[in-house]
Amino acid sequence: MYRCFIAALATAFLVPVAAAQVQRNFPQHALRGQLVVADPPDVLVNGRVARLAPGSRIRGQDNMIQMSGALSGAKFWVHYTLDPQGLLFDVWILRPEELAKKPWPSTPAEAQSWAFDVTAQVWAKP
């Protein structure tokens, strides 16, 4: 029993470290912007009024789901996707190393005209 306790304790400390090192893969249609959570579901994206879709997911830097109400008044750099009605559906709050990957499109027109390397998660302008 003593060995099981030590193994469980060691696993508990190693799992968060390993999870923090995993590269998040963003979809090709994800755009970058600055998100300000005003009064959920209302938000500002790049200074423009937007709305969170029903069932939208906001993932923190640790990739855990964040509640929009808890983020009220905060400003973040994010990658986000839109649903067919133009509402924000998936939102990822960026870590510093993800934000450093530039360029990243901020409009659908840029995303259509640039080339995306899915494996490296980088964009290239034409």
Image (spheres, rainbow, N blue to C red):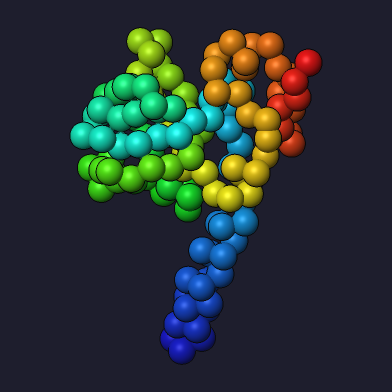
The percent coordinates of residue 13 (x first, y second) are 51, 73
Q: Position of residue 49 (x, y in %)?
A: 32, 22
Res 50 seen here: yes
Residue closest to the eye, 32 or 58: 32
Q: Residue furthest right?
A: 126
In the picture provided, is 122 more to the left or to the right than 18?
right
Q: Quadrant of residue 28?
A: top right
- Number of callouts in the render? 0
Q: Residue furthest front?
A: 47
Residue 114 pos. (x, y %): 70, 17
**Quadrant occupied by the C terminus:** top right
Say which quadrant the N terminus sits in.
bottom left
Query: From what the image shows, is residue 19 above or below residue 37?
Result: below
Question: Going 60% across and 23% down the picture, which residue do you hit?
Answer: 105
- Picture residue at 75% right of the left edge, 20% below the top: 125
Whether 20 is drawn above or below 124: the answer is below
Place residue 120 in its image quadrant.
Answer: top right
Q: Is residue 90 above or below residue 19?
A: above
Residue at 55% across, 49% down: 95
Q: In the rendered image of this protein, does residue 60 appear above or below residue 81?
A: below
**Residue at horizontal 26 percent and vertical 43 percent from the top:** 72
Residue 118 can be seen, yes or no: no
Q: Is residue 118 left or right of residue 84?
A: right
Which residue is at the far bottom? 2
Closer-to-camera residue (66/13): 66
